Image: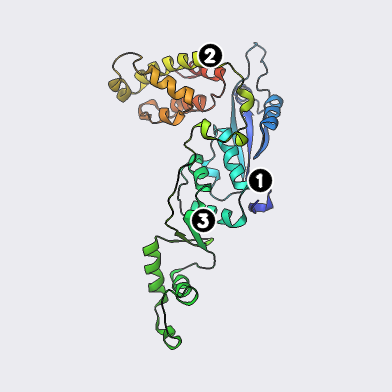
Amino acid sequence: MPHYDYDKDYPFAAFITNLGKYNEGALVGEWVKFPTTAEELKKVFERIGIGAKDEFGQTYEEWFITDYDCYVDGLYDLLGEYANLDELNYLASKLDDMSQDEYERFQAAMEIGDHTGSIQELINLTENLDCYDIYPDIHDHDDLGRYYIEELDAMQVPEHLRNYIDYEAYGRDIALEESGQFTDLGYVRDTGDSFHEYYDGERGSIPEEYRVMTFQDDIPEEEISEWAMDLAYDMDEFFRQNDPQYAAEHPEEHAAKEEIYENLMAGRISALETRSWLPWGRPRRTIFLRRLRSSRTPPAMKNFWMWTPR
């Protein structure tokens, strides 16, 4: 396990909140340290009332994340209200498995902005740390030039001529050639190794040992399929009413229902996010995405249309 900020023994924690209670004016939730387990998360859901009924007999089914405690530099801004808990646990587990050297390479890659646009990209970054080298004591071009000449013997320079070398200019050329960058952790260079995608964003590609929402997996496939088809029907209608580009591409009513259904069943939410959201406005777009992202249970899919303003 690497050394996290403030000497914490976990990379981040999330405050998971009962969405139904929140909409009623009550903040009912609990801090969860990641990585966690399916058993622990199930207990948390029970304690915060997910699965319980309100006074009208309606089940509290939805949750969201109201806050994070994050001890990995640069990670906080990538953690959203409706983040996928399996993804969060996958990332946290990969971070916990790192050596200190691997963690420093990960942090350096984050600082230069390589493959840091989403949790999915960060997970893939954890699997591709061999793409980066770090020279921890190199902080400017002069340092870099001296290191390459004096330590790596990149250029044979007689001792009596070393005072005449423009180390800064030489270091600048090296950094330019290697596409290297200076970070708080030192100089970072690309090793030239290929960057491979191990995680494609689909739940099926998350290894079993990292999944924590498995306690919601015991719903019959036929029931999930039926509700996914209902949701696909409603979503197609919603897209046609609110996205002119979608309506132009699919002039026949419900012509794309099967495509949406297949994306839902496969968990390919990102494929649905590529729609043109601009005409929708932020409130409707936010409601749509939060309902869709949190739809790990069929009731969440079933209630989507109720929650989306018309």
- Which amino acid type is marked by label 1? Tyr
Whole-percent x and y of residue 177? 36, 64
Q: Which residue is mark 1?
A: 10
Question: Quadrant where the C terminus lies?
Answer: top left
Give the residue at mark 2: 222
Q: Which residue is under mark 3?
A: 108
Q: Amino acid at mark 3?
A: Ala
Residue 290 screen position, x and y as percent: 51, 27
Residue 303 can be seen in this image: no
Quick check: can you spot residue 162? yes
Callout 1: SS? loop
Pick whichever, 246 or 86, lies toward us: 86
Crowdedness near tag 1: few (<14), some (14–19) or many (≥20) residues, C-alpha within 10 Å: many
Q: Residue furthest bottom?
A: 160
Give the amino acid type for the residue marked by disc 2 in the picture. Answer: Glu
Q: Earlier in the sequence, mark 1 or mark 3?
A: 1
Q: Residues within 10 Å of mark 2 (few under 14, many from 20)?
A: few
